[in-house]
Image (spheres, rainbow, N blue to C red):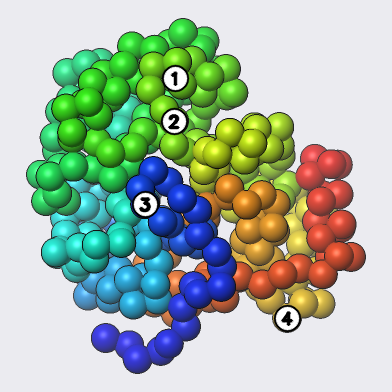
Amino acid sequence: MTSKTTTVAGTGTWRLGDLELTRIGYGAMRLAGPNAWGPPNDREEALAVLRTVVEAGITHIDTSDYYGPYVVNEIIREALHPYPADLCIATKVGARRTHARGWPAAVSRRELVQAVHDNLTRLDVPALDLVNLRMTRTLAAADIVEPFTVLAELRDQGLIRNLGVSNVGIEQVRAARKIAPVAAVQNHYNVASRRDDALVDWCAEQGIAYVPFYPLGGFRPLQVEALDRIARDLGLTARQTALAWLLQRSPSILLIPGTSSVAHLYENIAAAVELPGPALRTLNALGARG
């Protein structure tokens, strides 16, 4: 176990139900093999990363039983069970893995109930802290009603504590909220990919956590060049700069950067810096032009 003392203290927290989540969390998908398939290249390092996450004071881990599949949840249990009382483990349902390593939807009642019970078993918990329903954003708002109702029923049974939605538009979120409270939205969003600007602001107004994935996904070459230049000027990496921008973008944004390396984990934690005004304005303009 490393003795390094870098922590997420000072990054702030977000209240999610009865849970106090650090705004810098950890995304566990990369603990599996390439394309989130199969075992990690270095299982001992994967275990060390998870234990360092907890040592650093992070209270929010994002996972899914279809990472591996099953591999990541089993590693989380091995590394951290019995879990710290303040640790929130968020998982996702609504997809499955094929032998061709695809990610087709799995939102029937049978599939969702099975997925929730599989997560409960492999994580070895009596209830799941947060379950995000993975949808397809292009679907109609009405398409979320049936699967979200299934999860709401499981919540009423005490198997789920909080519900979230992923890969959705605002009308899908509104439709879900008519069924049960929505604690979190998890979508693709970063300094260059700003489709969700209005949704980010709306979530903050509604007290809903917004959890962006792919913090460097969807950048054009000129945007990458500008980000690299700002990062060099600030003495940061491009990834740290992009993560720092997200932290300043909205108080309800929770980060889940993933890594399979303890050193890289510390680098992500060090992204909790306040960007100066000129850098912030330049970064904001990247999205305005994109």
Under circle 4, the secondary element is: loop
Residue appearing at x 23%, y 43% in the figure: 128
Q: Circle 4 sits on which residue? A: 235
Under circle 3, the secondary element is: strand
Q: Circle 2 sits on which residue? A: 182
Residue 19 disc label? 3
Residue 267 disc label? none
Under circle 1, the secondary element is: helix
Proximity of marks 4 and 1: CB atoms separated by less than 8 Å: no
Q: Earlier in the sequence, mark 2 or mark 4?
A: 2
Query: Which percent across, then down, holds residue 164?
Result: 41, 34
Category of crowding for the residue at label 3, using alpha-carbon neighbours closer than 10 angstroms: few (below 14), some (14–19), many (at least 20): some
Q: Alpha-carbon distance for marks 2 and 1?
A: 7 Å
Category of crowding for the residue at label 1, using alpha-carbon neighbours closer than 10 angstroms: few (below 14), some (14–19), many (at least 20): many
Residue 176 disc label? 1
Of 244 and 99, which appears nearest the observer?
A: 244
Query: Which percent across, then down, holds residue 163?
Result: 36, 33
Q: Earlier in the sequence, mark 2 or mark 1?
A: 1
Q: Earlier in the sequence, mark 1 or mark 3?
A: 3
Q: Alpha-carbon distance for marks 4 and 1?
A: 43 Å
Query: Which percent across, then down, holds residue 219?
Result: 70, 48
Q: Is residue 218 left or right of residue 184?
A: right
Considering only vertical position in the picture, is 120 above or below 254?
above
Residue type, mark 2 in image: Val
Proximity of marks 2 and 1: CB atoms separated by less than 8 Å: yes
Under circle 2, the secondary element is: loop
**Which numbered disc, 4 or 1, marks the residue closer to the eye?**
1
